[in-house]
Image: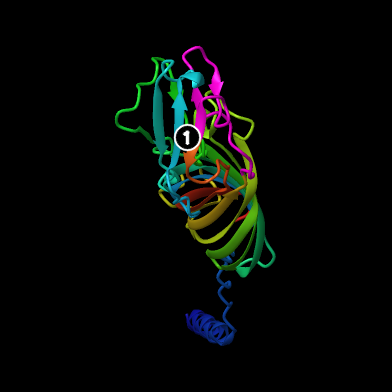
Amino acid sequence: MQALLRAGTALAGIVVAGSALAADLPRRAAPPPVFTPVPVFTWTGFYAGFNAGYGFGTNDNRRDPTVLGVNGASGLVAPGTTAAIAFSNGRNSNEGFVGGGQIGYNYQFTPGSGFVIGVEADAQYVDFGRERNRFAVAPGSAPFLAGTQIFNPNGVSGLDYFGTVRGRLGYAFDRTLVYGTGGFAYGAGGGRDFGLPNGSSDDFRTGWAAGGGIEYALPTDSFLNFFRSSAVTLKVEGLYVNLDRGNRTTGAFGATPAGGLVYTNSPGVVLASGGAARDRSTEFAVVRAGINYKFGSY
């Protein structure tokens, strides 16, 4: 019996000693937390989007009205009668809604903050020239023959669409980009408003554009990200556009009921007053807001 007690006592001593030794052993360190780096935003990548705004003319078209006297030899009024026509040359012809789309590519040299270069092309519908062909017939003048068409001989500028291909250079402050832009511009206007009933050789014009803006990139999970792009950006931009129309005499100012064109130097037509009938450049500024969907690097 005593032997069993001695054995139990020895076993208990061994257990106690083992526990003390285990307490003295160094504890195993917990694994370090997993660090997931936050991606640094970059403007590098392709993008496409839409824009809308307002355009207004910047060239001064305010001149005295152009007055033409015509008689029966012109074919616009009955033989033996005369008429006088006054054309308004106001500048309110280049003003209205602007809207369209754009595509482009940016490259940022250093992600986060740094310089950004890019190229952008856009195409715009414009609602210019609502009053570009206003004229009045002097009281007491002979009425024009039925089917006669009259056009402004000064070719007061109007526009139906324009587009640009521009370079962009800016600096990014993380998700905010401030930039300048400039490059090639083109545009065209409709038909008789440029001097001919079915268009003229000067309908399509080219020139240049310059401006600048600011753009901000929303988070990727923005509710505006309908196309699941890498980013959605919002921008506000100002652009000046100059389309050269040359400096030559405009085409016809009238069409007879039989379809014949009548020019300012046609028989029976006298330029009574006003400046020479010349084409002018189309100059206007555009202020617009836009949205872009960026595809590529985050």
Q: State whether residue 45 is above or below residue 252.
A: below
| Residue type (three-letter) at the residue carrying disc 1 | Asn
Picture quarter containing residue 93? top left
Which residue corresponds to the image point at 50% horizontal and 33% vertical from the top-left? Answer: 270
Per the rendered image, the range of residues in magenta is: 245-270
Which residue corresponds to the image point at 57% horizontal and 46% vertical from the top-left? Answer: 280
Residue 179, percent from left and from top: 58, 63
The stretch drawn in magenta includes residue 70: no
**Which quadrant does the C terminus fall into?**
bottom right
Q: Look at the numbered disc 1 and give the secondary structure of its residue.
A: loop
Q: Nearer the viewer, residue 51 or 96?
A: 96
Which residue is the site of mark 1? 152
Which residue corresponds to the image point at 42% horizontal and 19% vertical from the top-left? Answer: 77
Report whether 130 appears left or right of 249.
left
Q: State whether residue 163 is above or below residue 283.
A: above
The number of numbered discs placed on residues in the rendered structure image is 1
Residue 185, percent from left and from top: 62, 47
| Residue farthest toward the left in the current orientation of the protein | 139
Q: Nearer the viewer, residue 6 or 263?
A: 263
Asked whether residue 42 appears in the rendered view, the answer is no
Q: Nearer the viewer, residue 94 or 113?
A: 94
The stretch drawn in magenta includes residue 267: yes
SS assignment for the magenta stretch, majority:
loop
Query: Would you call the spot at circle 1 few (<14 residues within 10 Å), some (14-19), or many (20 or more)?
Result: many
Asked whether residue 236 appears in the rendered view, the answer is yes
Residue 243, percent from left and from top: 60, 47
